[in-house]
Image (tube, helix red, strand yellow):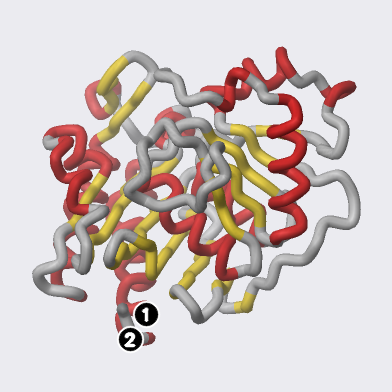
Amino acid sequence: MPGSGDLAQVADLIRDVAAAELLPRFRNLSKDDVRQKRPGDLVTVADVASEQRLASGLAKILPGVPVVGEEAVEADAGLLDLIGRPGERCWIVDPLDGTSNFAAGKATFAIIVALVEDGRTVGGWIFDVPNGRMAVALAGQGVTLDGAAVVGTPSSGSPSGFVGYKIRKAFEQQLPAARRHGLGPVSTLRCAGVEYLEILAGRATFSIYRRTKPWDHAAGALMLAEAGGGAVRFDGRDYAPAQPTDAGIIGAPSRQALAVVRAVFEALELPLLQPTED
């Protein structure tokens, strides 16, 4: 498990990478700088450059610990097997969370880094690049947002939250506002990292995603747990970074809020909560 010195180094590295690789390219991409990995799934030169610099820096912080980056996995899916290795560590990196926002010139994107040990997340960092917000969590030692400790509190009203954009349409069709008993407004920022920070900041209460790519959720799930809440799969088991990507995730910063949100969705038995392919 990393010490406080390692924590500071990771946070500094993330800020440096954002300043060097993301901000200079934001709203400054050419047509040739953006491509589709598959229909609707974009990657830019900024994603690639950011991941390369993060991987190089993380290798210096913890020599010998492999890096599982979103773009590297695109080229070699076998890297995902490193996440669940018993007794071993690896980094998980999302070099540019919210690529579609970034490519469209929308200031909602982040860098996410997680450290996994023995199949569980032990460290997490999320940096809201345009706004300079940084959340850091270490297993058993709490979570901070811009240096201030975050402790989740029970929701005093109907919890509001985020629904992953790939299930948002189905959610709205099957659960219109009039039927959302126990839930408040829902939205999507198309950036899981910034959504987790909004939850930690107290401006939302939960998030729910059907697809759970580890670079999107490993760090955020740890942060919610360290705030006093947690994250669970759609089948009720605890979230784990090596879980199947169609297992789903429901997260909240307090156990009370998590129970409320789970109860609403379990009672409805929505088809969108069943494991299916996108």
- Judge whether 232 appears above or below 178 on screen: below
Measured from the top left, where is residue 275 in percent x and y?
A: 47, 25
Q: Residue at x 28, y 26 (%)?
A: 34
Confirm whether residue 107 shows in the render: no
Q: Which sits in the foreground, 164 or 257?
A: 257
Q: Mark 1 is on which residue type?
A: Ala
Q: CA distance from mark 2 to mark 1?
A: 5 Å
- Judge whether 136 appears above or below 132 on screen: below
Q: Residue at x 35, y 23 (%)?
A: 41
Q: Residue at x 50, y 52 (%)?
A: 238
Q: Are marks 2 and 1 in contact (CB under 8 Å)?
A: yes
Q: Which sits in the foreground, 271 or 64?
A: 271
Which quadrant: the N terminus? bottom left
Measured from the top left, where is residue 114 in percent x and y?
A: 35, 60
Which quadrant: the C terminus? top left
The disc placed on residue 5 is 2
Q: Quadrant of residue 58?
A: bottom left
Confirm whether residue 150 shows in the render: yes
Callout 2 crowding tier (Cα within 10 Å): few <14, some 14–19, many ≥20:
few
User: Helix or strand or loop: what does disc 1 sit on?
Assistant: helix
Measured from the top left, where is residue 167 in percent x and y?
A: 57, 23
The disc placed on residue 208 is none
Q: Residue at x 89, y 22 (%)?
A: 178
Residue named by callout 1: 8
Relative to 174, is 136 on the left or the right? Answer: left
Callout 1 crowding tier (Cα within 10 Å): few <14, some 14–19, many ≥20:
few
